[in-house]
Amino acid sequence: SMLSNCFYVIMTRRMSATETSESLILFSALAPAVLLLPMLPFSLSLPQDGWHWFILLMLGVFGAIGHWLLVQAYRLATTTALAPYPYSQMIWMIIAGWIVFNQFPDRWTLVGAAVIVASGLYIVHREHRLRVRNRAALDVEMEALAKKL
């Protein structure tokens, strides 16, 4: 699941530079539908009442809106600027699971989440240090160039 999500995010980022938001949304919906179509005869189960159809409709509407917003974010911002948001998503999913399903993650899930968050924090820290170092090196070069003039 995580590997598929990473692939999805990377491809969305790369393709958002050349494709329209609408085409990305269309093809991200069509590709899984076509791939899963052969399994349909073995697992077809239609909703039994209008409420379930409404829930499915809202899932599609909000999913499309969310995907459109994601494409816009990757088009307008750098990946490093957007990197912290999946971590907040993990927190919101834990809260939603607790409120909606009365489930709290077990200890190994929390350990895994802690490893993921720690890795992300390390990357943010390292990128900040690299930026500071590069900025300092650029300042030194600019001073040397100014002295030559």
Image: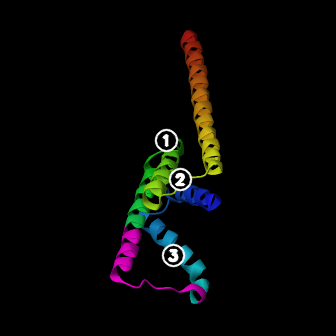
Q: Which one is nearer the viewer's eye here, 132 or 3?
A: 3
Label 2 – label 3 distance at C-alpha:
34 Å
Q: Label 2: which residue? A: 104
Left or right: residue 10 versus residue 21 is: right
Labelled pair 1, 2 in contact (Cβ < 8 Å): no
Label 1 – label 2 distance at C-alpha:
30 Å
Q: Amino acid at mark 2?
A: Phe
Q: Amino acid at mark 3?
A: Leu
The residue at the point 43 percent across, 60 percent down is 100
Q: What secondary structure prevails in the magenta region?
A: helix
Is residue 122 in the magenta section?
no
Disc 1 on helix, strand or loop?
A: helix
Quarter of the image where the C terminus is located:
top right
Q: Residue furthest bottom?
A: 41
Disc 3 on helix, strand or loop?
A: helix
Residue 72 is tagged as: none
Left or right: residue 96 versus residue 136 is: left
Label 3 – label 1 distance at C-alpha:
29 Å
Of tags 2 and 3, which is closer to the observer? 2
Residue 132 pos. (x, y %): 57, 24
Residue 108 pos. (x, y %): 66, 49
Q: Magenta span covers which residues?
A: 42-61
In the rendered view, tell whether residue 70 sits above or below residue 143.
below
The answer to which image quadrant residue 139 occupies is top right
Packing grade of label 3 (10 A; few <14, some 14-19, many >=20) is: few
Residue 127 pos. (x, y %): 60, 33
Is residue 50 in the magenta section?
yes
Q: Label 3: which residue? A: 30
Of the image marks 3 and 1, the number of the one nearer the N terminus: 3
Q: Label 1: which residue? A: 81
Packing grade of label 2 (10 A; few <14, some 14-19, many >=20) is: some
